[in-house]
Amino acid sequence: MYAKQKLSYTTIRCNEFHIMSSRAATRVFQGVEEQIATGQLKDGSKLDEASIAERFSVSRTPVREALLQLVGSGMAIQIPKRGCFVRSPSFGEMIEMFEVMSELEGMCARLAARRISEQQFSELKTANAGCKRAIETSDSDLYYAENVAFHECIYEACGNSYLANETRRLRRRLQSYRRLQLRVRGRMSQSLKEHDEIIEAIEAGDAGRADHVSREHVMIQGERFNDLLAQVGQRQ
C-alpha cells in the first residue's frame, strides 16, 4: 500500500515537473522567436543554451525544448558539432511565403465551404467568439491563439489532410510575423471583420467567395506591408 502511494506521488510530481518544463519551454520559444522576428537576433547568430537559460531564468532543459521547436518551425537550424543558429528570412522571402500562405488558406476555405459539417461549422463560430473576447481585453497574443483555433477549424473542415498539414507547416513558419501584425492599431478588429466574412461565405456554401476573402485575410500588401515593416522597425 505504501509503495503504491509512493509511486502515485512520484508520478504526480513527474507530471507537474513536465507541465512546468513545457510552460517554460513555450515562454522561451516565444521570447526567442520574437527576438528573431524583430531583428534583435540576427540571421546566423548562435543560440547559446547557457545565455538563453540565464536570460529567461530557466534551466537548460526547457531551453533545449524551445530550440527544437525553433528548428521545427524553420526559425533556426541545427548544425552538428557546432550548435543551433538563427535562420531568419529576408523580407523578400517573407512576402513570398505570405503569398503562398494566402493561396493555401484560400484553398482550405474553398473546400470547407463545400464540405463542412454542422458540427464543424458550430466549432468555427465558437472559435470566432473566442477572437471577439480577446479583442475585448485588447490582448493580441490571446487573439493570435484564438485566431489559430479559428483557422484550425477550417483546416479540419476542408477534408484534405495533406493540404491542411502543409498549411499548418507554413503557418508555424510565419507565426511570429503574423503575431506582430496583430499589434498594429486596428488590425485585430479588421481581422475579426474578415473572419465574419469568411463565416458568411462558408455558411452560404459560396466556395469562390470563401476562397477570395480568405486569401485577402492572410495576404499582406500595400498598407498592411508598410504597417508590418514599421512594427518590426520599432522593435529593432
Image (tube, rainbow, N blue to C red):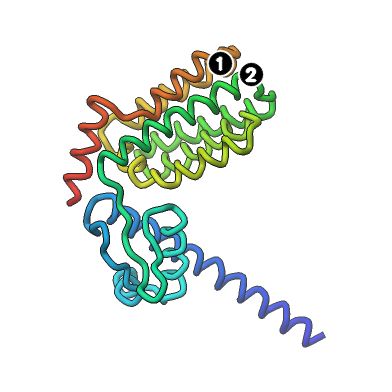
Residue 146 versus residue 169: which sits nearer the camera?
169
In the image, residue 49 sits, relative to residue 174, either above or below, namely below
Instruction: State the CA–CA distance, disc 1 to disc 2.
Output: 7 Å
Residue 139 versus residue 144: which sits nearer the camera?
144
Residue 213 position, x and y percent, is 44, 19
Snapshot quadrant of residue 26 = bottom left
Q: Are marks 1 and 2 in contact (CB under 8 Å)?
A: yes
Q: How many numbered callouts?
A: 2
Q: Residue furthest front?
A: 80
Q: Which residue is mark 2?
A: 114
In the image, residue 159 sits, relative to residue 27, either above or below, namely above
In the image, residue 4 sits, relative to residue 159, either above or below, namely below
Q: Residue furthest right?
A: 1
User: How dense is the environment of label 1, judged by Cα within 10 Å: few (below 14), some, or many (20 and up)?
Assistant: many
Q: Is residue 120 left or right of residue 195?
A: right
Q: Quadrant of the N terminus?
A: bottom right
Residue 52 position, x and y percent, is 32, 70
| Residue 207 badge | 1
Amino acid carrying label 1: it is: Ala
Taking the spot 42% from the left edge, 64% from the top edge, the residue there is: 67
Q: Is residue 36 left or right of residue 157?
A: left
Residue 63 position, x and y percent, is 41, 69
In the image, residue 113 sits, relative to residue 99, either above or below, namely above
Amino acid carrying label 2: it is: Arg
Q: Secondary structure at mark 2?
A: helix
